[in-house]
Image (cartoon, rainbow, N blue to C red):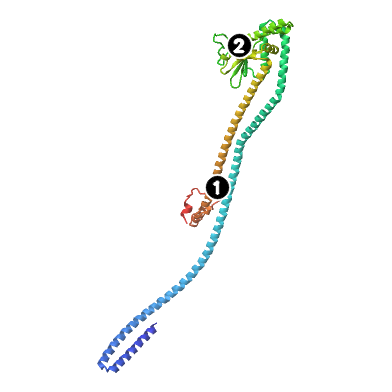
Amino acid sequence: MIEIILAIIAAAAIVGCFILYRRLDSKNTTADALREQSTRLQAESAALSTRISMLTEQLDIEKNRYATLGEDLAATRRELSAERENAAKLATSLRLIDEQREERERSMEQRFKNLANDILAQNSRDFKEQNEQRLSEILNPLRQNLDEFKKTVTDTYNSEARERFSLSERLRELVELNQAIGREAKELTGALKGNNQIQGDWGEMVLESILERSGLQKDVEYKVQVTTDSAGAALRNDEGRQLRPDVVVYYPDERCVIIDSKVSMTAFMEYTSTDDDRLRKAAGERHVKSVRAHIDELRGKRYQEFVGTSRLDFVMMFIPNEPAYIAAMRLDPALWQDAYEKRVLIVSPTHLVSALRLIEQLWVRDRQSRNAVEIAEEAGKMYDKFAAFVTDMERIEKAIESTRKAYGDAMTKLSQGRGNLLTRAQNLRKMGVKASKLISRTSTPDDTDPQDSDSEE
């Protein structure tokens, strides 16, 4: 570079001399002017020499600096090469570390999923067992109630079928009973003749015998020789006289009917024992008169006004001797209607058995109705249990869905979402957090910020 500068200076000097020479030659300058010019040029040349010396020194300095910089550059290049080698090695190590980290994360995630699935499966099994146990606790009583309901319906149906089947048998028994009563009446004719007390006792005995065979429960569905009302007070009429009906038969609807036995045997036995038409006619008239007297007697006692709170508006007058009843009805066809108008219903053993049988059937129907009501109540309770069970199952279904959603959210926060807990834990380890163990499948974070996965990108 210095050689170039010197060449430039020399060329400039030559050009200057040439120009000066030309000027001197062309203008014929004087010697003084040339000397002055020469002196000036010499001064300029000296200045240039000084400048060249300074530049030369500066050039040497720059050469030294350049040499130093070259050495530094070589050293820097060597260091850069070494750093590149180190960076390559570090990159390889980091890649291996990342691969190992990813493998551990995948393994940890899989282990956690397996653990969660195991827990969910165990919870499902526990829930299934608890649900089956609860279902058994609910359904077993329900099944038992259904079996009892079925048995009740079957028993009721069979009972009604047996009752319908046995109706003809009962009627046959009633006919036989009536015939037996007739035979007993004939056998007792001699003993009863002329003794009103014995006749009355016999009539009450026949009445009670029919009641015992009627199927009605004594002291529940009928009572004999009633002397007190439902409050325990003595039965008395308006005149204060003691009342004592032979029998009070109760209906299921709390109504009742009064039955009083009346025997007219003396005139009837005379009527049946004579062949004399005149005597027979007179005995028949006395027999009818005796029956009418009993009707008027019952009418005067007015049992239906003092016995029971929901009694029927008539009294049954029971004639225990069927032939005596038939004879009275034949001798006086208006007798039954006249008695009915006086609120007295005349019944024979056959009629009474039929009436009591109807009342007994009313009680059977009432018991069946009460059973039906109880069955309906049980069915209502069973339906309520079913409704509560369905509500519980719907609540359980919602709880399962909520658990599944919570499980999904937890998995997202743990290992799937951005900024998940596993990634953050690994980052903490990279930043130098000391830990003696890796995260295990049984470890769970204590605190979870539901907004963490959304706050970091």
Relative to 441, is 313 above or below?
above
Split into 4 quadrants, where in the image is the N terminus?
bottom left
Callout 2 amino acid? Leu
Left or right for 182, reference 421: right
Dot 2: element: helix
Q: Is residue 343 visible?
A: no
Check if mark 2's residue and mark 1's residue have beta carbons within 8 Å: no
Q: Is residue 33 visible?
A: yes
Dot 1: element: helix
Residue shown at the point (52%, 52%) measured from the top left: 412
Residue shown at the point (47%, 51%) measured from the top left: 451
Callout 1 amino acid? Arg
**Residue 56 location (% of width, % of height):** 36, 81
Relative to 373, is 443 above or below?
below
Q: Which residue is mark 2?
A: 298
Relative to 85, is 435 above or below?
above
Q: Nearer the viewer, residue 375 or 15?
A: 375
Toward which corner of the image does residue 130 lie, by quadrant?
top right
**Residue 450 location (% of width, % of height):** 48, 50
Toward which corner of the image does residue 26 lie, by quadrant?
bottom left
Q: CA distance from mark 2 to mark 1?
A: 86 Å
Mark drawn on residue 173: none
**Residue 419 location (% of width, % of height):** 49, 55
Mark drawn on residue 404: 1
